[in-house]
Amino acid sequence: MVSFAQDLKKAIRGRLNKLTPENYDKISKNILEMEVDTEERLSAIVQIFFDKAVDEPIYAPKYAELCKLMFEKEVPSASGTGKASFRKLLLDRCQATFEKEKKDEEEIVSKQKALEEADTEEKKKELQMELNERISKTKRIMLGNIRFIGELFKLRMLSIKIMNFCISKLLKSRDEEQLECLCKLISTIGKTYEEEYDAKYQRAVAESKSSGKQPHMQLTKLDVYLDEMKKLSQSEDLSSRIKFMLMDVLDLKQNRWVPRREGEKPKTIDEIRGELEKERLEKELLSLEEDIIKQPQMGYPSQRRDGGRDDERKKS
């Protein structure tokens, strides 16, 4: 039997599949008007926003905005006592994202071991394909989640303390996949992180003046992490691809977090229509070319040499 929560998920996904910059306000209003009065339904929405942000990274900022609209939403807890909040469910999902990475790594290691122990070429080929697919999927999910977490922070739904933890964890691993996530995260949050750190530092200085104590910060300045990334960019143990990514982040910082080239953005309805029209015309042209090729070749009279009919007359 299909539950109401499942029906709700289907309805929300259907609307989000039609999301464009022009209809964002209409669709977000429509979603907010839906009946979400249980923890199961509220949790389902959090899951959908994360899943969609991973599947459609260019829409991650829009899905973060939707989370902001629902951030204060509360419903009766499934336990029967107290309230379940969108805020808490969102934080739990972010934490679960990092915990799941460990399980994914263990699964990949297990598949690698099975590949090494395979006794036939056919089995090795099959396991290698499975391993490649798993690694590709894990990487896509990791990068999508980390960008979405960054977008949530930019809208002040996650604290700078959480970002501090995420950066530190990713930087310590020295794993290339983790370092790629680190580059994605800092590229996303760098400007906001520095602004929030500076604001907290100014408050700490003001408090220290009134108390007579030295300002105390439990956060790490972003420059400390960037210095470590600069050292890594010169490491011989990392691939050129990752070293270039690290240098791109450092370059972004030097340019005051303004990208030198504009990133991919969600397409407008007019752009989508234009692409569809272009695709239609290309198909028509291809079909026309195929029809021409299929037509039988028409025969032409062969040209006579040495003057043709005039020569024949001379012979007669």
Image: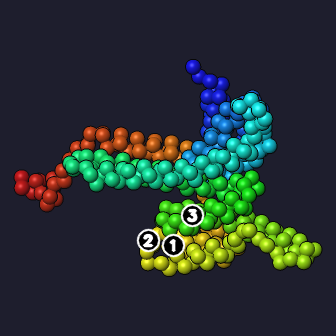
What percent of the width, then of the height, locates residue 305? 14, 58
Q: Are marks 2 and 3 in contact (CB under 8 Å)?
A: no
What percent of the width, then of the height, locates residue 99? 56, 51
- State the residue position of label 3: 170
* Amino acid type at image mark 1: Phe
Q: Is residue 206 visible?
A: no
For this rendering, which residue is in front, 315 or 253?
253
Residue 244 numbered mark, or none = 1
Q: Earlier in the sequence, mark 2 or mark 3?
A: 3
Q: Is residue 216 left or right of residue 152?
A: right
Question: Would you call the spot at circle 1 few (<14 residues within 10 Å), some (14-19), or many (20 or more)?
Answer: few
What percent of the width, then of the height, locates residue 304? 16, 54
- State the residue position of label 2: 239
Separation of residues labelled 2 and 3 (CA atoms): 17 Å
Q: Earlier in the sequence, mark 2 or mark 1?
A: 2
For this rendering, which residue is in front, 209 or 120?
209
Q: Residue at x 23, y 46 (%)?
A: 122
Q: Residue at x 55, y 67 (%)?
A: 172
- Count how many numbered circles sit on residues in the image: 3
Q: Is residue 132 left or right of residue 297?
A: right
Quarter of the picture containing the N terminus is top right
Question: Would you call the spot at circle 2 few (<14 residues within 10 Å), some (14-19), or many (20 or more)?
Answer: few
